[in-house]
Structure formats: structure tokens, C-alpha cells
Amino acid sequence: MAAKKLRRARLSQELCERLSRHQITTCQDFLCLSLLELMKVTGQSYYDVQKLLCKVSRACAPKMQTAYEMKLRKSANPSSAFLSTTLHSLDKVLHGGVPCGSLTEITSPPGCGKTQFCIMVSVLATLPISMGGLDGAVIYIDTESAFSAERLIEIAGNRFPAYFDSDEKLSYMTRSIHLYRELTCGSVLKRIMSLEEEIISKKVKLIIIDSVASVVRKEFDTKLQGNLAERSNFLARGASVLKYLAEEFSIPV
């Protein structure tokens, strides 16, 4: 929750812009500063800064809910809790499909179809809710340059020929999938940490990273001293932000 943008903590636009000039954009950035540092960058009094600290703390603190409330929310609309893969056997194993509001990791030996599965799920997320989709946009972070627009259109046309029966629908679907090629751990992490406002503005309903393992393998040789700690730090930071985004916006990641 500390990764939440300050703009969503209901601070004034003027204050957010002032903080942004000092690279203070998230609740975590704000809460890591001392009272004196905050007084300096905000230009506000000791008392006003204390009020700001309380406001930001409340904005990023997880809201208390009972297990019963969680159960009620999911049982009220079971279909919204999962994105069906349309593969009956897999949906059965997953108890409904890819879960919304949490992280899902897909692992297998090379060449087993992980990227093809990610492309297929991207198509599914853009479908109307009446067809089992999420009726939203997709953010696809490609770290291996393996994404193929041609394959995306081919999968859409083969799996749902009755729906994608016109160039207009295919065009709308492709415009809903936002592709980013990030080839280093640093750029992947930077992209992840900038997604919050994009999720809101583009009505994103699915985030895919294909794949985390490839950039980690390229950059971290665990046999070298210190690399294991750096790798663990990268994975922990990335997972923390992704978990927050999944839970905050109730989307599958």
C-alpha cells in the first residue's frame, strides 16, 4: 500500500506537484522523510506537516475487513473473482481461472507455451464481461522481445471467430493491449512502479510480465558474491508493488 501515488492520497494538486519536483511521488517516499525534511519541501508548519503525515498514513494503510466481509464480496459476484482461461481442465484446477486481486506465476521448461498462454489471456481480458472477459485494457511487459502482434490477431480470430468477425473489432482489441519492452531489471522495476495512474486512466484489467526470470538470469549470477542479495531485493520490491496493484485494483497480475 505504501506504493500508492500521493495524488490518490487526496493531497492538493499544487502540493503533489511541489513534492514531485523533489522526486516524492508515493506514500512511501513521503513517509520516509523526517518532519524537518517535510517542512522544508512542503513549506508548511510543523503542525500542518503532522496533519499531512496522518492523512498520508491513513490513505496507504490497509482497510480493516473481516473474513466474513471478504467471503460476502466474492460470493456476491463469483465471476469477478477470476478470469477464465476458457480451458476447462485448467480452470477446474485453478478453481475458476486466473484469480483477480493476486499474483499468478506460470512456470515451465522453455518452449512449453508460456508466451502463447500470456497472449491468449491478453485477448480474453479485452472481451466483454458477457463472454467471460474483463472488458478492459492490458499492460504487457515484454522482457524477451517475444510478443508477436501477428500471433495475437491469429489467436483472437481462431479462438473467437464469431466475435472477431470484423477488422474494427480486431483493431479495438489490439489498441487495448499496451506493450512495453523492458530488457533490464532496472527498467522493469521502474515501469512497474509507474503503473498506478496508467491503470486508472486506461482502465487496465490485466498486467502481464513475460518474463521476470529472463531479466534476472541475464543480470544476476548467483555464484558471484553479493548478487544473490541484489536479486532477492529486486524480486521482493517488484513483487511488493505488483501485489499492491493487484489488490488495490482487484485485477489479475
Image: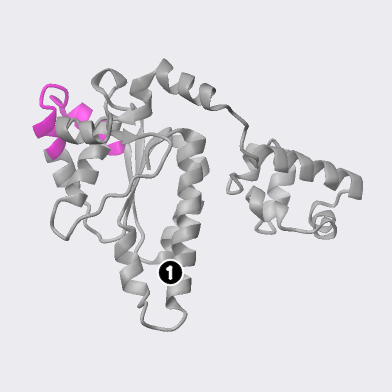
- Residue 130 placement (x, y as % from top left): 27, 17
Q: Is residue 86 left or right of residue 65?
A: left
Give the side of residue 68 with respect to residue 51, left or right.
Answer: left
| Quarter occupied by the C terminus | top left
Up-down relation of residue 64 to residue 180 (above or below): above
Q: Residue at x 43, y 32 (%)?
A: 203
- The single residue placed furthest to the front in the displayed view is 67
Is residue 112 visible to the viewer in this orientation of the structure? yes
Q: The magenta stretch spans which residues?
A: 155-175
Q: Is residue 190 visible?
A: no
The kind of secondary structure element at disc 1 is helix
Residue at 45% across, 66% down: 232
> Looking at the picture, does residue 247 appear above or below residue 27?
above
Residue indicated by mark 1: 231
| Badge 1 density bin: few <14, some 14–19, many ≥20, Cα 10 Å | some
Q: Which residue appears at 57% of the width and 27% of the height?
A: 66
Picture quadrant of residue 213: bottom left
